[in-house]
Amino acid sequence: MSTNQLDKKSEAWSALFSEPMSELVKRYTASVFFDKRLWLADITGSLAHAEMLAAQGIIGADDRAAIERGMAQIRSEIEAGTFEWKLDLEDVHLNIEARLTQLVGDAGKRLHTGRSRNDQVATDVRLWLRSEIDLISDLLVELQTALVDVAEQNVEVILPGFTHLQVAQPVSFAHHLLAYVEMFARDAERLADVRRRTNRLPLGSAALAGTTYPLDRERVAVTLGMVDEQGNPQVCQNSLDGVSDRDFAIEFTAAASLCMVHISRFSEELILWMSQNFGFVKIADRFTTGSSIMPQKKNPDVPELARGKTGRVVGHLMGLITLMKGQPLAYNKDNQEDKEPLFDTVDTLKDTLRIFAEMVGGQLNPATGVKEGGITVNALAMEEAAKKGYATATDLADYLVKKGLPFRDAHETVAHAVKAATSHACDLSELPLAVLQGFNASIEKDVYECLSLRGSLNARNTLGGTAPAQVLSQIARHRTRLA
């Protein structure tokens, strides 16, 4: 088939068919207007394939040079926005191949030797996703760093820790923020693991059964950087699995879903903390909106929208799992539907991480070199809230245990003390010593140190605890890890 025939008839298999594809089916089956974002991965994979074909003597050096010359021009055209994407050519692969053949003639037709669009697209998506994982990993570092920065400024700030959204025990606000740093650190670990399995080469699997040409698949893997930590090439070992596997896309979307769940949890806290009923923090105005009818409102739209987008990403995960559940080996057209949910998951996660890093840590002022904006903490409101729920009750129980009382008995004794404080509308620390001694004679004046918020905080000086000394140690650990 000539270049013109390929361009006009649009199907690389046209000679077999007696009638052209209907316009409706053409629009229904085309993917070019969303998979064209794979263009760089497609060119990169094709150049590595051409290099290998020439090294194996399957195509000549002149053909390889022509392919490289044509691909360089195509890249320039796409980057300049002058490349004409054609619906008739269905997808990114045929669009680039048709233009290459138009530019360099028969050499362009030889490029597809030893491969199919099945292994080609599987390779392209892996290459594209690998680079996106790297970008997302960098954004996770930025967000963690922003949280650590805010934490370092608020080590001594006391926040009421909650269980069941009831005041439980006092914690350092920094300690609370570092809990999210731990979550996002695990997200980064998961993505690194997903990247390892994504970074395997399907190319050379051809349509499903491999190829009769003497391909050097490991050479292509090395060229494309699809290697392990020791530099060993990573190649899909079964051609059927190579063309039909989308585990890596599902794994990525699962990891992205969990990351968004962590963002959603943080969003919920920001929404609560920003409300007038809490008043713990403020975020910069550029991350909020007003009301069309209530002029006093400042709404936390960014956290709310992130909370909503989490459902969207989790929905993409469910869609991809459902997409694959009924497919027999090997490749099926169903797999075209893997791209839009995957692309949207990547875009949503990147945008969310980027905006949260700035919303938390602020924006760098190029004139001063200092970050401005970000979270503003109302330390007084946090501490006052911590005083309202008898947050040091457990400390009183621990005090009694150290005096020799069994914990269950101490727990019961403190419950009576809390009941008395409630009836007197005061905190435990405000009960007279004589009243406290009425519950247990071993209570002495030193009890007031453990009943103070600061004393409670300092007492939890074990690994992973909320004591400022432990929090500073954790901040140092995260600084080293994120450097």
Image (cartoon, grey):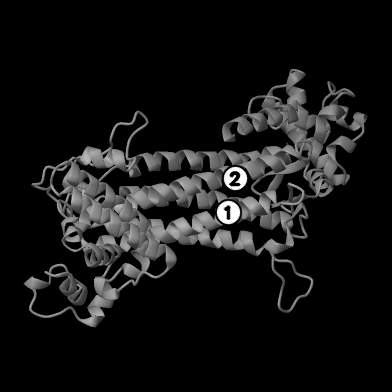
Q: Which mark is residue 354?
A: 1
Callout 1 environment at 10 Å: few (<14), some (14 to 19), or many (20+)?
Answer: some
Residue lying at the far top of the rendered structure: 404
Q: Quadrant of the N terminus?
A: bottom left
Quadrant of res 24: bottom left
Does residue 28 appear in the picture of this structure? yes
The structure residue drawn at horizontal position 18% and vertical position 74%, both measured from the top left corner, is 4
- The quarter holding residue 109 reads bottom left
Which numbered marker is on residue 139?
none
Mark 2: secondary structure: helix
Q: Percent from the top left, x then y, of residue 426?
A: 87, 43
What residue appears at the point 28 percent right and 37 percent down from the top-left corner?
234
The residue that label 2 is drawn on is: 142
Binning the other alpha carbons within 10 Å of mark 2 as few (below 14), some (14 to 19) or many (20 upward) gives some
Residue 248 locus on image (x, y percent): 34, 47
Given the image, on which type of amino acid does mark 2 rest?
Answer: Glu
Q: Is residue 250 above or below residue 23?
A: above
- Depth check, front residue: 47 or 333: 47
Residue at point 84%, 37% (across, down): 428
